[in-house]
């Protein structure tokens, strides 16, 4: 679902040249779901091999990452581990959304409405264990570091990005900022053009710097976390009805400490249904001190034969197109800094 604080967060356009030589932590699940929802056929169906297995995520991993590696960017993909129990609420809501999308997709098929088919089909896909396993295999074969987080990938990415040698986090969601990521990069792995009713528009990468955000808003990280809880996080998806982003900002700026902030809305929290009521202290602790772990960052040797085994032999990708991309990858030298990044961990 992701935290919605877009209205109050300033963003800067990012020139890709700024990232040359930088190492970025990627919120793997967030990016893979982007690939699954955006890399599709004309009718909205995901890319599939002859056996009907979905390959949109593999296509995204390969082509988008070859492009990023060609820009001199180093990548660490961080996969989700076991989420906190509180996240069950968000999963339930996502499930309900998928059920609705499935009904509407079936109606669109009957009506032969291609636009609606495309819209709703993108909401139906889920990552399964085999898709995750193959994604990790392909990433490592491309020389990209893969980390299995103990908890949520996004919080682990934010934690590692505070270490020396790593620049920031790649994700479309703003949650990384609440987890303390110094820099959040958005729109890095999505298509550079987006279709709208008025035609195609250019989508540019964005850079959000936490220190600047906090300074502009006139708050500290504890207040930002409190604001997120008021608006709604994956641990309390509905937040507090009637409190949007701007009102939440006004509350946290006026009351400052989390204790005073949530004392002021205590009655509103108590008025929520049993399912939506939440303990702010529990959520605050999950956001302020999530379960994370130090890792030895290792970038594996590239294995082009493995890449071709996954894409060409298993899933029928064009060997010529894969070879062309591998030739680009072959020209990218792994720098000493990339090889030695593990010394910081």
Image (cartoon, rainbow, N blue to C red):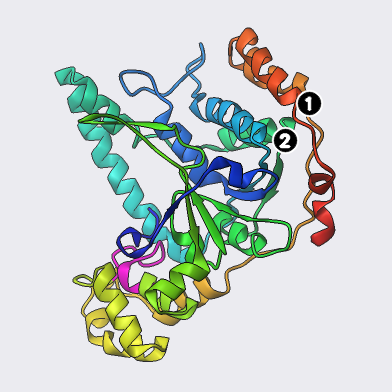
Which quadrant holds the C terminus? bottom right
In the image, residue 101 above or below residue 115: below
Name the one closer to the observer, 130 or 27. Answer: 27
Instruction: Single out the residue that lies furthest toward the left.
Output: 111
CB under 8 Å between discs 2 and 1? yes
Q: Which residue matches tag 2? A: 140
How far apart are the alpha carbons under marks 2 and 1? 8 Å
- From the top left corner, tell me how far across and down residue 252 is, in percent: 34, 82
Residue range in magenta is: 229-239
Say whether residue 278 is left or right of residue 154. left
Location of residue 3 in the rendering, given as x and y in whole percent from the top left corner: 38, 60
Residue 152, quarter of picture: bottom right
Residue 275 visible in image? no
Secondary structure under the numbered disc 2 in the rendered image = helix
| Residue situated in front as seen by the camera: 328 or 175 | 328
User: Label 1: which residue?
Assistant: 303
């Amino acid at each position: 679902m992701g935290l919605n604080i877009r209205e109050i967060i300033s963003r800067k356009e990012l020139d890709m040249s700024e990232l040359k030589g930088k190492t970025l932590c990627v919120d793997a699940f967030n990016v893979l779901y982007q690939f699954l929802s955006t890399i599709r056929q004309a009718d909205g169906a995901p890319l599939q091999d002859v056996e009907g297995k979905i390959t949109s995520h593999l296509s995204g991993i390969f082509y988008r990452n070859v492009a990023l590696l060609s820009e001199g960017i180093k990548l660490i993909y961080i996969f989700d581990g076991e989420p906190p129990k509180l996240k069950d609420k968000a999963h339930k809501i996502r499930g309900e959304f998928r059920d609705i999308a499935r009904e509407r997709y079936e109606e669109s098929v009957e009506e032969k409405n291609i636009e609606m088919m495309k819209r709703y089909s993108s909401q139906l896909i889920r990552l399964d264990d085999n898709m995750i396993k193959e994604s990790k295999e392909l990433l490592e074969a491309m020389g990209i570091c893969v980390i299995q987080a103990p908890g949520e990938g996004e919080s682990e990415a934010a934690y590692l990005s505070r270490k020396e040698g790593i620049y920031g986090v790649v994700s479309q969601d703003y949650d990384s900022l609440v987890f303390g990521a110094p820099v959040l990069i958005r729109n890095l792995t999505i298509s550079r053009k987006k279709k709208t009713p008025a035609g195609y528009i250019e989508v540019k990468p964005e850079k959000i710097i936490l220190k600047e955000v906090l300074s502009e808003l006139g708050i500290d990280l504890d207040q930002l976390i409190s604001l997120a809880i008021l608006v709604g996080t994956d641990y309390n998806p509905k937040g507090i009805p009637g409190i949007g982003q701007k009102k939440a900002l006004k509350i946290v700026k006026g009351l400052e400490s989390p204790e005073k902030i949530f004392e002021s809305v205590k009655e509103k929290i108590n008025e929520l249904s049993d399912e939506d009521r939440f303990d702010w202290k529990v959520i605050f602790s999950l956001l302020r001190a999530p379960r994370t772990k130090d890792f030895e960052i290792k970038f594996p040797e590239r294995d082009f034969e493995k890449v071709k085994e996954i894409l060409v032999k298993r899933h029928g990708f064009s060997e010529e197109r894969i070879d062309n991309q591998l030739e680009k990858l072959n020209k990218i030298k792994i720098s000493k800094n990339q090889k030695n990044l593990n010394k910081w961990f």
